[in-house]
Amino acid sequence: MPRLTRVESSAGATPVNAYLVEGDDCVVVIDGTLTVSGGRALRERVAATGKPLAAVILTHAHPDHYGGAGEVVAGSDAPIVAAAGVDAVIRRDDALKEEILRPMFGDEWPRERAFPTQLVDDGAELRFGDIELTVDELGPGESHHDTVWSLAGGTNVFSGDQAYNHMHSYLADGHWEQWLRNIDTLSAELQRDTVLHPGHGEPAGVELLAWQRAYIERFVDAVGSADWEHEDRAKAAIAAAMADFLPTEELRFLMELSIEPVAAELGVR
Ligand SMILES: [Zn+2]
């Protein structure tokens, strides 16, 4: 059974996970974190195993999961693997992410981002020595294109951002209805003893999906019921409602970035 290690990068107060899957004779990395230092730390963790990097796999199309991937594969010929839909969104939106993230993260946001070099179809099974991973393509949800990856030989699922482990969440891509449907699909399909290895926070059981559903519903309700006659007050009321639901500052800025897009999508603003 391959050995799993969660590696959290918190550069720029943005905690995000990547995972090392260490097999008998190689290592697969799941997601690349956001930053140069996050990607380098992953490369060093792989080097410390003494085993070659076989691949970096990207769960979804958000920059906190692909930004550092180029640093992870630097000096190796390991592919960056993603579903075609994830690859397409990364390439389409990368210039926009550059505009948003450069001022926030400076040189920690890589000057050149590496894009996927190997594309896979829904249901593809990839084998790297004794590591076997299967992709389940969900489509739009938390990002414009989401996948989850299951590790054979147990009930471990790399679930990307389908469920954040009690951190504020990003809904600005506007697909929360599909996201809720994806949560339902996963809740129905995953075995009850599945361990989710999420993009943010500690590993958890499948009950985390129900928590994420409640978070999404609370947020959309708060945006929809706010008094948008007074925009600043509306935003403050939404942030306060979410701070009440989840009293943590972690990734609060992602929630705040989501207020205007969700209000626009709901037609309340
Ligand atoms: Zn994320």
Image (cartoon, helix red, strand yellow):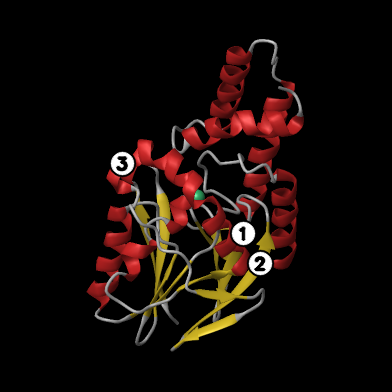
Residue 195 position, x and y percent, is: 55, 64
Q: Amino acid at mark 3?
A: Gly
Dot 3: element: helix
Residue 130 seen from this side = yes
Residue occupied by mark 1: 146
The numbered disc on residue 137 is: 2
| CA separation in Å, label 1 and label 3 | 27 Å
Horizontal side, residue 164 vs residue 209: left or right: left
Quarter location, residue 106: top left
The numbered disc on residue 58 is: none
User: Mark 1 near mark 2, Cβ–Cβ under 8 Å?
Assistant: yes
Residue at 39% x, 43% y is 14
Horizontal side, residue 152 vs residue 228: left or right: left
Up-down relation of residue 260 to residue 161 (above or below): above
Residue occupied by mark 3: 106
Residue at 34% x, 87% y is 25
Front residue (pair 169, 6): 169
Dot 1: element: strand
Q: Sequence-wise, which precedes: disc 1 or disc 3?
A: 3
Horizontal side, residue 59 vs residue 7: left or right: right
Q: Sequence-wise, which precedes: disc 1 or disc 2?
A: 2
Q: Sequence-wise, which precedes: disc 2 or disc 3?
A: 3
Dot 1 surroundings within 10 Å: few (below 14), some, or many (20 or more)? many
Residue 228 position, x and y percent, is: 69, 16
Dot 2: element: strand
Mark 1 or mark 3, whichever is nearer to me: 3
Residue at 36% x, 83% y is 26
Residue 71 position, x and y percent, is: 31, 63
